[in-house]
Image (cartoon, helix red, strand yellow):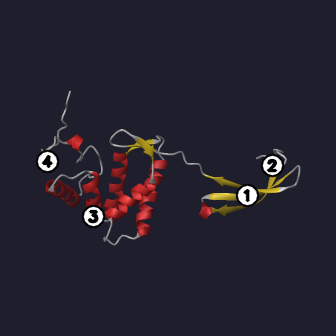
Amino acid sequence: MRCPFCQFPDNRVLESRSAESGHSVRRRRECLSCSRRFTTYERIEFVPIVVIKRNGERESFDRSKVLKGVMRASEKTGLSPAHLENLVDEIEMELQQRSIREVTSNEIGELVLKHLRRLNEVAYIRFASVYRQFKGIHDFVETLNQLQTGGEEGSLENRQFTESARNPGQHSEPGTPALNSVSG
């Protein structure tokens, strides 16, 4: 660390303490050449997460969007804002711990559903209905049945309610997989 006054490369640390609620370390330093004191901060550098949206566009991960969606789904369910903040923190932490810096919006949606399922069934159904683009009561009933039986709801391979997973206007029968329409 170079002294900001004389550019000498060596200094000594006089004091270190936690700052910004534990998210950084504040250090008071003294230059070994000019004896002037200065302060430095150390922070964890997070590499930005890129979200690949359904339409193929890429944008930076915005935790406020996830929080907004979770809060909307959780209205009048009794879940505290602290619970919802913790849920979004856990999701963001999971994404930060991945080695791949790009994630699809579907993966984020499935993570939200996985976490909501543990907290509140009503919030789970509300979020699923928007995220998976339910087209009718059939989608609600199917999701409720899976929730009640404890089926593997969280994986993309088992359930997708998006247009790409169904032919428009057609619903698969319960227990049969939905077929993708192929156009050439």
Which residue, given by chain and number where applicable, does mark 2 sit on? Answer: 3
Separation (CA) of disc 2 from disc 1: 13 Å
Q: Are marks 2 and 1 in contact (CB under 8 Å)?
A: no
Separation (CA) of disc 3 from disc 1: 47 Å
Q: Which mark is residue 48?
A: none
* Secondary structure of the residue carrying numbered label 3: helix
Separation (CA) of disc 3 from disc 2: 56 Å
Which residue, given by chain and number where applicable, does mark 3 sit on? Answer: 121
What residue occupies the far right of the structure in this picture?
Answer: 34
| Residue 137 image position (x, y, % from top left) | 14, 57
Q: Which mark is residue 175?
A: 4
* Secondary structure of the residue carrying numbered label 4: loop
**First along the sequence among labels 2 and 1:** 2
Residue at left offset 43%, top offset 58%: 88
**First along the sequence among labels 3 and 2:** 2
**First along the sequence among labels 2 and 4:** 2
- Amino acid type at image mark 3: Glu
* Secondary structure of the residue carrying numbered label 1: strand
Q: Are marks 4 and 1 in contact (CB under 8 Å)?
A: no
Left or right of residue 60: residue 175: left
- Amino acid type at image mark 2: Cys
